[in-house]
Amino acid sequence: MSMISKFKEAIIGLKAGCVTLHYPAQPRPVAENFRGRPIFDAQKCIGCAGCANNCPAREILVLDVCQEIRILKYLGRRCTYCGRCADVCPEKAITMSHEFETATNKIGDLHQRLDLFMSTCQRCGRCFKESSPLEQLKLKGYRFDDLDHERWIFRSRAYLEAEPVVDDIKIELD
Amino acid sequence: MLKNLCQKMFGRSLWVYHANSGGCNGCDIEVLNVLTPYYDVERFGIKLVGSPRHADVMLCQGPALRATARALRYAYEAMPAPKLVFAIGGCACGGGIWHDTYAVLGPVETVIPVNFYIPGCPPRPEAIIYGVAVAVGLVDKKVAPVEFKQLPLPIPRYHPADLTGRDEMVVYEKAEKI
């Protein structure tokens, strides 16, 4: 009896086959509604900075270099791929791609940086402020984020304090 | 060069230590998923060990918190000398959604040096395997920084100070340069 049971086990083992994915050798497609890395289309983008105002992780930084040119920088480090930027974008310039193979040894590889021409009001040179709070979420205004240190600045306090707003807390090690 | 060095140092197998310094457990589940027979990562020789003193690689999940930064540092220092650190997930790479709260110091790299980044919240098990494969040298990394730069305006910057001459013989000196 014991011999037969061993044979049975062997047959079951042969039947099972290989379960393991041969992933890096063979590609593995994702589901259709999978959200991967967001891709910014510079041709469609109008530079309203709605994505920067709505990003929960504050990953999109905006800096106005001069009256006409606005720099939009996507850092991609702590992005949760929630897709709110793609939802908010009025021109559908942001698409959530199916890219998930984003492992790198340099964090700078994830950055996306766009230089955009801004079309502003001909009379005052600035965009309008919306009346309702919901509209103000999609505020089209001037922002001065710190692109060199990859740091975002609170809009209300940016002009008041000369020293950095988000200061680095030193780690207490002995 | 780093790849060659990695292959030289970690030629046989990587023993990984799994350190969570205050994440939400999402990345933990994905890492444990990678070790299951379906995404069998032991075919690359990777094995989970319980102590940092046995490990070559530290898999970090979660941001460096005020409370756990010191413990993370000690765990890093306890590892024997050729060591790699993987930052898995958006918290470990960049500090996470709550990067600006009082308890969070920031990404893991504020405390310990990080060699490989696997962003995602949480990253798919395939993405983690891809990161491991990049580190071991089986595949090349796919991402590269994207920059879109505007060309300078073709419209001349007309300035009256550059005008010379009188009446009908007005010459714009910099017209050639445009």
Image (cartoon, helix red, strand yellow):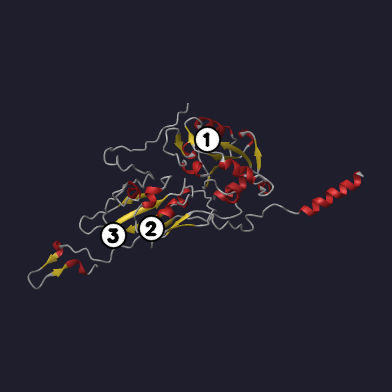
Return the residue at label 2. A90
Q: Amino acid at mark 1?
A: Gly
Q: Nearer the viewer, residue B130 or B56?
A: B130
Q: Residue furthest top?
A: A174
Quarter of the image where one finds residue A56: top left
Q: Residue B54 in the image: state x and y as whole percent.
A: 64, 35
Q: Amino acid at mark 2?
A: Pro
Residue A158: image x %, image y %? 29, 41
**Chain of the residue under the numbered disc 2 shown in the image:** A
Mark 3 sits on what residue?
A119
Question: Identity of the amino acid at label 3?
Answer: Ser
Q: Is residue B83 visible?
A: no
Binning the other alpha carbons within 10 Å of mark 1 as few (below 14), some (14 to 19) or many (20 upward) gives some
Looking at the image, tell me whether mark 3 or mark 2 is earlier in sequence order. 2
C-alpha separation, residue under disc 3 versus residue under disc 2: 15 Å
How far from the left and from the top, in percent, is residue B51?
Answer: 63, 33
